Amino acid sequence: LINFSFSGILRTGTIGKYVGILVNIIFAYLGFSLFVYKEKDIVKFLKQEENPHNIFGTVISNKILDTSVIIDGRIADVAKSGFLEGTLIVPEFVLEELRHIADSSETLKRNRGRRGLDILKQMQKEPHVNIQILTQDFDDVQEVDSKLVKLAQIMDAKIITNDFNLNKVAELHGVKVLNINELANAVKPIVLPGEEMHVKVIKEGKEDGQGVAYLDDGTMIVVDDGINFMNQKVSVMVTSILQTAAGRMIFAKPNAKKQIV
């Protein structure tokens, strides 16, 4: 349409020549101005084209698995549930550490290593879980934890672990960590002081007279005077809750109105 509109002018000798040049300059300037004004939107659109799942411009980061979280095994169920997006990366040096543990002369250690390898094989068979084995290594770094942190920094990835020390080291280096233990604590049912529950006292506590019971999710319950109800089910009332990095601990006392269930 533009060419048609200016076709009469462009045919009129010298004037048409200069008008054509002027028109080209104007449209070139308008195009450049539009690009500068909308640069961020254009870049965002191109990134979305590279990653079609990222329709809202949110970058889905990769997650690097460490040895402890693989051996733990809960990562398989979390990944299968669909709560983890992106690629789950297993570095070759983590695989090597698993193989070394699996070849240990100690029975318990050997079983843990083999369990980790079985967990990885199970996850690879899941159609909706994307597992990638990464061969990149760092010969100048000796410790596996340090290698994980360095790899996460290079890839701008998160580390999934349940290792308390790795958690702290990664945070010191500005690497984001997803801790399976913290996730487990977050999804546990909330218990408030004053609530009543029925538990079975199975062993003595550290303090005199205390008994220890456990909920189905593994939460420890310390029962005052629980020693008197050893191996019995008892109705207790929650007095306080202690939340730590290692987990949650509930303190309770026997219900005076209804003790033995």
Image: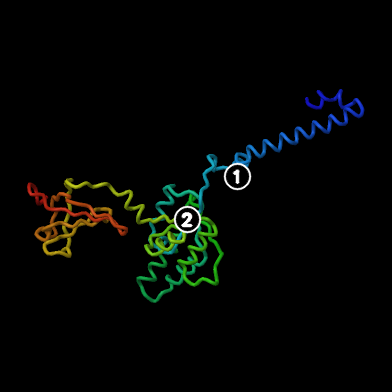
In terms of secondary structure, where does tag 1 sit? helix
Q: Residues within 10 Å of mark 2 (few under 14, many from 20)?
A: many
Name the residue located 71 percent from the left edge and 38 percent from the top edge.
32
- Tell me how many marks there are: 2
In front of the other: 95 or 196: 196
> In terms of image quadrants, where is residue 49?
top right
Say if 237 sits above or below 19 in the image. Answer: below
> Given the image, on which type of amino acid does mark 1 rest?
Lys
Name the residue located 90 percent from the left edge and 26 percent from the top edge.
11
Q: Which residue is mark 2?
A: 158
In three-dimensional space, the C-alpha distance between marks 1 and 2, rounded to whole angstroms, equals 21 Å
Q: Which residue is mark 1?
A: 47
> Given the image, on which type of amino acid does mark 2 rest?
Lys
Query: From the viewer's perspective, is 29 left or right of 16?
Result: left
Q: List x then y, in percent, for residue 87.
A: 51, 53
Which quadrant is home to the N terminus?
top right
In front of the other: 23 or 231: 23
Q: List x then y, in percent, for residue 119.
A: 43, 60
Instruction: Pick out the residue farthest to the right.
Output: 13
Q: Earlier in the sequence, mark 1 or mark 2?
A: 1
Query: From the viewer's perspective, is 247 left or right of 52?
Result: left
In terms of secondary structure, where does tag 2 sit? strand
Q: Residues within 10 Å of mark 1 (few under 14, many from 20)?
A: some
Query: From the viewer's perspective, is 86 left or right of 197?
Result: right
Query: From the viewer's perspective, is 17 left or right of 204?
Result: right
Q: List x then y, in percent, for residue 92.
A: 52, 65
> In terms of image quadrants, where is residue 106?
bottom left
